[in-house]
Amino acid sequence: MNIADENKYVDLFVRDTKDLLRDPLVESMKTYRHHGETTTHYHSVYVSYRVLKLCVRLGAQDRREIVRAALLHDFYLYEWYTEKHDENHIFYHPKESVKNIEAHFGTLTPMQRNMILSHMFPLCRELPHSAGAWILTAADKRCASEDYLHASRAFRSVYDEINRRASL
């Protein structure tokens, strides 16, 4: 991705998420592996950035609400490769993310809650109920596939620029 071509989206993304990106617990997501060698932070920024671009193209009125939920969709804060739970990670982590978000940031909107709980559809039982939930679900599948195939590396320059601007 070329930064010059992405500037307007990077500006919008940082404007919508800067406070979250600066949060120490969100920063801690850089220490958790997610898909192969990708971190949870990198994946979440990548997904939410793709979500932002889709929202802009579709003219979504609730873009900021959707993008912020997308950034936090994997806010489960554990190393899923080694830390096991009674329930499979696929089903467990959306619920854990909602619990962590609401404990740390406050109550999610009903749409944000559904977005996060349903982002593993069709593997999970929660159905997406809004355009934002469907956008997140689709973007997450695409980005996860790209993570495993190492194709998400092309996002690195945009990711670095987002982090640089968020820290200003």
Image (tube, helix red, strand yellow):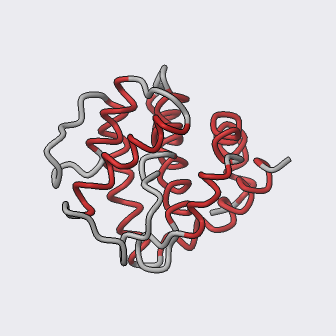
The N terminus appears in which quarter of the rendering? Answer: bottom right
Left or right of residue 22: residue 89: left
Residue 157: name its quadrant: bottom right
Decide which of 113, 77 is in the foreground and name it: 77
Left or right of residue 9: residue 74: left
Decide which of 38, 5 is in the foreground and name it: 38
Percent coordinates x, y for residue 134 in the rendering = 30, 39
Q: Residue furthest right?
A: 168
Residue displayed at 35% across by 49% down: 96
Decide which of 103, 164 is in the foreground and name it: 103
Q: Please, is residue 146 above or below residue 70 in the view?
A: below
Left or right of residue 71: residue 137: left
Percent coordinates x, y for residue 7 in the rendering = 73, 47
Q: Please, is residue 62 above or below residue 139 in the view?
A: above
Q: Please, is residue 30 above or below residue 24 in the view?
A: below
Left or right of residue 88: residue 60: right
Percent coordinates x, y for residue 144 in the rendering = 38, 65
